């Protein structure tokens, strides 16, 4: 899981150790024994009332076949400590701060971005209670970097600090003294089974100033990725290491971001959510082979269990109740996959089911796909796949309420929706203090239909010919038309009267994981040619189409990544040629691609992009705005260079949208983000927020609480509904519609009475109309003051 570097080989160094060298007088002649020097060092740390350094882990090597290219990398490794329980550590991807009353920690990991560990400080710190403060924190501190755990801690806090270091090693030897930054140091060599370790110990203060680590085992990990290397070194430089020095009180103060979620334990989202599952093969006990392809187009509930697993046998009857409820539904598959080894034969598996009165379809896992494909680490584990093979739900604990909690999820998936975003939002968006069980994101109930209070609303037309309508695009050509996604694989074209004029079965690759489109983008180039893009959140590829829906390109063409999040068409460099801009989950960030699929640039500063928008000014110059899981809005120019995040990170923002509502060539910006800041904020309490070009909050309009039932809904549109300046049109999670002016004033709102799956503002035969889609069909409505 280590993200700090491709060179983090956690199992390499089991217990690595201490700090370097500075300000020392000549070597003391009476210390001629390596053992005595080490004892004096340990005593100096044990007796110290405080300690601080500005340590770094440093990796250096030359590529043999890389034209002597030198690679230098370093990582935080600093510690400040005051007895008995004040601490500040910056180690790899972790920051840990204890002021003596509270212990806070933050991890620079995508999985827990925005979460702050907030627990009581122990009365007396030990290495153990620091590492045990949280499982993920302990893992990052001990396995998150090249030099292993922070070695100063056992020196300061433990009696037998050197025992793990010297275990299995030859007797330490004293090398000739040398200098670090002009200061003389003892050098102690330790020959261990994994190689040569050297401590550099200040001759005056006995503070550790440098450690040289063994590299032979570490070399293997480096050369697997870099090829043959020369001059490999791995050291810790304990710059500024001082015992008993003055430490600023501010060092032990932790500044909690206003929008952070305070947690008692880091909440890690389940694996694989939103990702297309890899190839797998199960053997059904009915003799049928079950693969990813055989389940394509169906919602699949796969429960991994074993005959020896008591929690599994308690959970499976609840799953049986759900399966009985959906008996006869051909679009839903239930499967109980036994992970028992070959010593347990098929009859034994059947017998265990017979004993518990279960009739779920049974399968075996001879290729160990549970471990290698589904990332199953404990039983029971239940994985729910949508028809396109995406992991929508992942439960690896016994849920006694499964018979009640699973059906609403299945109903959404069967209706063509997506649910994994709701789960991920609980982890990436800020929330209240507490454990995962305390953070509940409620799916909003559909509100009873109502009329606007100020505007007169009329139904222009209704269309019931689209079977599973989703997100839409309005095309403002001569008559006006609306493009509606139908079941993620077809675009239905409606004319200005709401009649189906054409159906475009999208030319998509045959592989299931690449065969869905849940949102569309369009733009016209400098020669008047229209192009379309299609993709879906979490998929591996996007598709480029011409005006007649002929597929022109696919991007990317190979490799795997965590998934696409958003796409936009834009002419950023102003040459009249459109480019594709792609946001990704994970470190892939933002990429700019030509229409024929050639990569132009990559910006890696915006990990976990949530949405992209195109901004423009009165000169016609365009740029990108990217929202990330950090909650900020990052501008990116035509060369892929990022600017200062808008608003300086003062307000957490999840989604961003742009439109020229005033017709002056300058785009307005609105965003979706939490309606509150701080601990009182709950997931699902969102607002529409107006931002200036500098990112300052101009206005806020709170939305109804909850999340929409259709997770794929793009619920902000813009356009001119009232024959004056344009408006923002926002779909509430309860099926409500909110019409908001450019300056953030509510013009009107009403309830549609349906679960929305798409919306657009269109000009139909010159008449402005709001077009909405739902499981009941597509409707166009007009408004008058």
Image (spheres, rainbow, N blue to C red):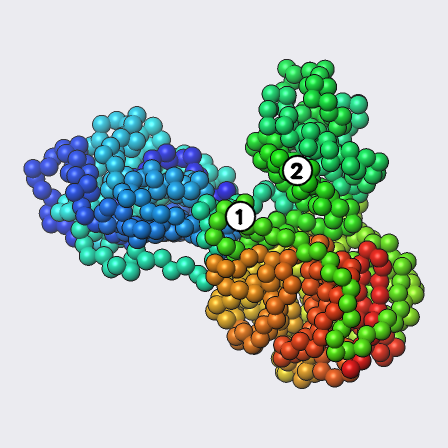
With respect to residue 54, does 140 lie above or below?
Answer: above
Q: Residues within 10 Å of mark 2 (few under 14, many from 20)?
A: some
Question: What residue is drawn where x is 40% and y is 35%?
Answer: 12
Give the residue number, with chain letter if any, for mark 1: 438
With respect to residue 359, does 241 lie above or below?
Answer: below
Of 337 and 706, the residue lying toward us: 706
With respect to residue 295, does 740 lie above or below?
Answer: below
Question: What residue is drawn where x is 56% and y is 63%?
Answer: 674
Give the percent coordinates (x, y) of residue 525: 75, 72
With respect to residue 586, does 545 lie above or below?
Answer: below
Is tag 1's residue or tag 2's residue first in the polypeptide sequence?
A: 2
Question: What residue is drawn where x is 54% and y is 74%?
Answer: 697
Secondary structure beneath dot 2 equals: helix
Give the percent coordinates (x, y) of residue 36: 14, 34
Identify the disc placed on residue 402.
2
Of 557 and 103, the residue lying toward us: 103
Give the percent coordinates (x, y) of residue 93: 42, 50
């Amino acid at each position: 899981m280590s993200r700090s570097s491709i060179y983090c080989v956690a199992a390499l160094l089991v217990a690595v150790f201490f700090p370097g060298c500075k300000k020392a007088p000549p070597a003391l002649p009476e210390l001629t024994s390596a053992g005595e020097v080490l004892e004096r060092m340990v005593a100096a740390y044990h007796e110290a009332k405080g300690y601080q350094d500005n340590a770094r882990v440093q990796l250096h090597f030359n590529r043999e076949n890389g034209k002597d290219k030198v690679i230098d990398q370093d990582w935080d490794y600093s510690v400040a400590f005051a007895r008995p329980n004040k601490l500040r550590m910056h180690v790899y991807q972790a920051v840990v701060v204890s002021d003596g009353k509270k212990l806070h920690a933050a991890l620079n990991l995508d999985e827990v971005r925005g979460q702050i560990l907030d627990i009581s400080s122990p009365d007396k710190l030990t290495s153990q209670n620091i590492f045990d403060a949280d499982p993920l924190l302990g893992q990052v501190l001990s396995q998150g970097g090249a030099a292993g755990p922070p070695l100063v801690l056992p020196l300061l806090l433990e009696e037998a600090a050197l025992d793990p270091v010297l275990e299995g090693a030859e007797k330490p030897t004293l090398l000739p003294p040398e200098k670090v930054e002009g200061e003389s140091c003892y050098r102690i060599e330790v020959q261990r089974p994994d190689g040569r370790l050297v401590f550099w110990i200040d001759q005056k203060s006995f503070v550790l100033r440098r450690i040289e680590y063994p590299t032979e085992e570490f070399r293997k990990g480096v050369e697997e990725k870099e090829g043959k290397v020369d001059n490999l070194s791995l050291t810790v430089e304990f710059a500024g290491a001082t015992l008993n020095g003055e430490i600023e009180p501010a060092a032990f103060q932790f500044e909690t971001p206003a929008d952070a979620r305070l947690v008692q334990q880091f909440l890690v989202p389940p694996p694989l959510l939103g990702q297309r599952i890899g190839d797998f093969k199960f053997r059904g006990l009915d003799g049928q082979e079950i693969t990813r392809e055989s389940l394509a187009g169906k919602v699949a509930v796969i429960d991994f269990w074993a005959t020896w697993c008591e929690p599994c046998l308690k959970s499976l009857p609840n799953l049986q109740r759900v399966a009985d409820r959906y008996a006869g539904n051909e679009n839903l598959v239930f499967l109980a996959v036994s992970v028992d080894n070959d010593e347990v034969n098929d009859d034994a598996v059947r017998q265990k089911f017979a004993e518990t009165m279960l009739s779920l379809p049974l399968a075996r896992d001879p290729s160990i796909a549970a471990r290698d494909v589904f990332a199953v680490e404990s039983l029971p584990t239940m994985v729910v796949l949508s028809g396109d093979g995406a992991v929508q739900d992942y439960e690896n604990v016994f849920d006694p309420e499964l018979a009640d909690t699973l059906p609403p999820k299945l109903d959404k998936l069967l209706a063509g929706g997506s649910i994994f975003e709701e789960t991920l939002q609980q982890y990436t968006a800020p929330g209240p203090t507490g454990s995962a069980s305390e953070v509940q994101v409620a799916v909003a109930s559909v509100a009873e239909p109502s009329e606007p209070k100020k505007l007169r609303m009329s139904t222009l037309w209704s269309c019931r010919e689209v079977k599973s309508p989703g997100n839409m695009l309005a095309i403002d050509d001569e008559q006006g038309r609306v493009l509606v996604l139908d079941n993620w694989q077809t675009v239905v074209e409606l004319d200005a009267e709401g009649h189906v004029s054409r159906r475009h079965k999208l030319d998509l690759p045959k592989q299931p994981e690449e065969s869905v489109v849940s949102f569309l983008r369009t733009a016209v180039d400098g020669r008047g040619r229209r192009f379309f893009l299609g993709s879906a959140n979490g998929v591996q590829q996007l598709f480029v189409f011409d005006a007649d829906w002929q597929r022109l390109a696919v991007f990317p063409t190979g490799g795997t990544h965590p998934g696409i999040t958003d796409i936009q068409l834009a002419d950023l460099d102003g040459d009249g040629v459109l480019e594709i801009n792609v946001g990704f989950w994970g470190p892939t960030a933002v990429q700019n691609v030509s229409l024929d699929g050639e990569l132009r640039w990559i910006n890696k500063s915006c990990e976990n992009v949530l949405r992209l928008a195109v901004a423009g000014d009165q000169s016609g110059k365009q740029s990108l705005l990217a929202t990330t899981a950090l909650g900020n809005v990052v501008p990116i120019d035509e060369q892929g260079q990022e600017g200062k995040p808008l608003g300086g990170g003062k307000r957490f923002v999840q989604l961003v949208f742009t439109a020229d509502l005033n017709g002056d060539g300058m785009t307005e910006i609105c965003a979706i983000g939490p309606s509150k800041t701080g601990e009182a904020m709950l997931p699902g309490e969102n607002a529409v927020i107006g931002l200036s070009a500098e990112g300052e909050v101009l206005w806020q309009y709170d939305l109804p609480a909850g999340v929409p039932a259709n997770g794929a809904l793009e619920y902000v549109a813009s356009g001119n509904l009232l024959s004056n300046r344009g408006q923002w049109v926002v779909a509430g999670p309860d099926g409500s519609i909110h019409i908001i002016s450019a300056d953030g004033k509510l013009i009107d709102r009403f309830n549609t009475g349906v679960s929305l799956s798409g919306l657009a503002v269109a000009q139909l035969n010159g008449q402005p109309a709001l077009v909405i889609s739902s499981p009941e069909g597509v409707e166009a409505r007009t408004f008058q003051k």
